[in-house]
Amino acid sequence: MPAKASDVVDESSDAVESLHALTTSGTYSVVIKSLDKQLDTRNTESLVDDVVTTVLSANTRLLEKHDVEYEGSRGKQVTYIEGENRLFARIFYLNGRLIVMSATFRNADYNPQFDLWVDKFFDSFRVSVPLLIA
């Protein structure tokens, strides 16, 4: 996480684990949700598309959406504006878990340099079995 350990909030419930790092430039998050049942691999892309559709509500303006690969699984990356914030999210289904990595910045403070920070953040995670955040 791109923050000091004291700035990271680690939360966990029955099926959801989340980490949030608050920095002076923005908020970085990883949310992992265990699904009740293993999906047929033919349905994973549909699940990820459904999550992207949910994230992109009527209050958002999509800036970019493209396919990405993570640990051998295809996912989506979206960039959008919601209210006063610019959000980046990568969404994957892997090992029976939905993984959402995101970075949020105030749109007024946004600088194209942040794109490099976001990519570095997204690319810094590796999955091991059982699924752990590295």
Image (cartoon, rainbow, N blue to C red):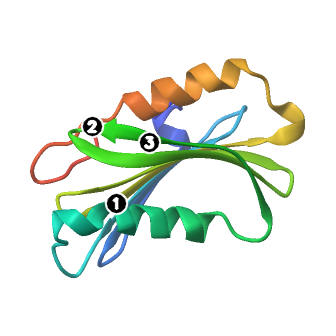
- The one nearer the camera, 119 or 21, is 119
Q: Is residue 96 visible?
A: no
Q: Which mark is residue 82?
A: none
Q: Residue furthest right?
A: 108
Q: Give the residue number, with chain letter if any, for mark 1.
A: 45
Q: Quadrant of the N terminus?
A: top left
Vertical relation: 101 (above or below) 31: above
Q: Which residue is mark 2?
A: 134
Amino acid on which the number 2 mark rests in the picture: Ala
Query: Which residue is situated farthest in the left direction here?
Result: 129
Pick the residue in front: 7 or 131: 131
**Up-down: is 125 above or below 55?**
above
Task: Indicate the secondary structure of the residue bearing disc 1.
Answer: helix
Q: Position of residue 46 (x, y in %)?
A: 37, 67
Q: Where residue 39 appears, x then y in whole percent?
A: 19, 72
Mark 1–mark 3 Cα distance, whole angstroms, equals: 10 Å
Horizontal relation, residue 46 to residue 120: left or right: left
Residue ID for mark 3:
67
**CA gap, disc 2 and disc 1:** 25 Å
Relative to residue 113, is residue 91 drawn left or right? left
Q: Position of residue 109 (x, y in %)?
A: 85, 32
